[in-house]
Amino acid sequence: MTERKRDFLTKPIVGWALYDWANSAFTTTVMAGFFPIFFKSHWSAGADAVASTARLGFANAFAGIIVAISAPLLGAIADRAGVRKKFLAAFAALGITATASLFIVPAGSWIIAVLLYSLAVIGFSGGNVYYDSLITVVAPKDRLDFVSSLGFAVGYLGGGLLFALNVWMVLKPETFGLRDSSEAVRWSFLTVSIWWTLFSVPLLLFVREPLAPFLRRGGKVLRESLGRLGETIAHIRRLPGLGVFLLAYWLYIDGVDTIIRMALDYGLSLGFKSRDLIAALLMVQFIGFPAALVFGAIGERIGTKKALLGGIFMYLLIVLWGSLIKSKEEFYVLALMIGLVQGGVQALSRAFYARLVPAEQSAQYFGFYNMLNKFSVVLGPLLVGAVALLSRSFGLSQTAASRLGILSVAILFVGGGLLLRRVDDVRS
């Protein structure tokens, strides 16, 4: 790392990045790792498999809709009142408490489990609105690529390290003095809440949020925030570059999120063992750490837009390759490719958007950004499912239908990439 980059590793930047290290443990261990499996086998034990899947799907949808609808208005209030850190802390506390509470939910209590999971997702997603917006506080415009990539990089590393420990706990519970794998999973949820709490502290201590330009209270803040929200919508409509970017982002990030959420299910449909799939997930985490930093450096060197387009093109290759794989070794190659670009595309998208919006209204604008993020996990899975079902109706095998379903995600990357080409790369 150059001297110039070390100069920008200030306490606020490190504190800000460590929040990604903190809450990424929830993404890996809870959302992607153990909750879906444990929910089906422990809390919904004996229930119809389709019914338990539907319950989990409704929980994710409910949490996503709540955050998506409220994020722009809450962002506007946080900007107007100067309380982005306080809102982040409140949402984080909700997520941490709900995650820790999963430790005590008894077997068969799927209603309590799904309620706590929904609250945890709301806390996680809601906190990210203010976390993302604080990048404009800690990073100069000419270092947004580096700082955004740093956050995602340490998030991959932190989430991967705790997830690796949790997988070890589940595979070898006796090593940790635990009775069985079920008890190990429950303790894993508790370790996530502790991890999330400890590594949130540096952001709260070191990031100094600017004072609100106008101090208002109660209803006046709400009325003014609603007014500013309307102005933001009009501003987005008046600036073609901003609106086009948001549409492009919605398309290609839907493709990214679809691959994140459907990859393991796709591997299972091809007959791969769950242990091999977990190993591939861990590979993505640890490759994502250095790869996100490299993408940040590439973005600073050749321009964020060019680097983003390169990442989207590589995702297009991933989809094409993924539709053809036949062995677990090829699945590992797929995981390697995903790990190389996943964090980079996410990080550079955040940095690109941060350059387009006014810093003093960043939480408000990132409310829209995160709203699209939540709604992005709709079109891709629907596309995959619809194409797979249609293919089956034409007499194709389940494997062939699954391959065509994954291949359909290419439409999202092509559409997003073409729209992104129309947006100017704003540099400081």
Image (spheres, rainbow, N blue to C red):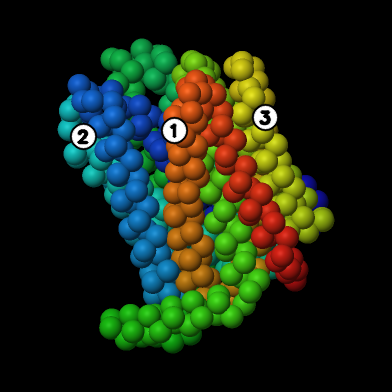
Vertical relation: 209 (above or below) 388: below
Gap in angstroms between the C-alphas marked 2 and 1: 29 Å
Mark 3 surroundings within 10 Å by alpha-carbon count, few (fewer than 14), some (14 through 19), many (20 or more): some
Residue found at x 33% / y 84%? 223
Vertical relation: 318 (above or below) 134: above
Q: Earlier in the sequence, mark 1 or mark 3?
A: 3
The answer to whether 11 appears left or right of 228 in the picture is: right
Residue found at x 73% / y 60%? 421
Which percent across, then down, holds residue 54? 29, 37
Amino acid marked by disc 3: Trp
- Of circles 2 and 1, the one toward us is 1
Q: Using the rendered view, name the quadrant where residue 147 is placed.
A: bottom right
Front-most of 257 and 348? 257
Gap in angstroms between the C-alphas marked 1 and 3: 21 Å
Vertical relation: 33 (above or below) 3: above
Amino acid marked by disc 2: Trp
- Kindly state the secondary structure of the residue where label 3 is placed: helix
Q: Using the rendered view, name the quadrant where residue 315 is placed.
A: top right
**Residue 104 can be seen, yes or no:** no
Which percent across, then down, holds residue 319? 63, 35
Contact flag, marks 2 and 3 (Cβ < 8 Å): no
Q: Earlier in the sequence, mark 2 or mark 1?
A: 2
Mark 1 surroundings within 10 Å by alpha-carbon count, few (fewer than 14), some (14 through 19), many (20 or more): some
Gap in angstroms between the C-alphas marked 2 and 3: 38 Å
Residue found at x 39% / y 75%? 77
Give the residue number, with chain letter if any, for mark 2.
110
Amino acid marked by disc 1: Leu
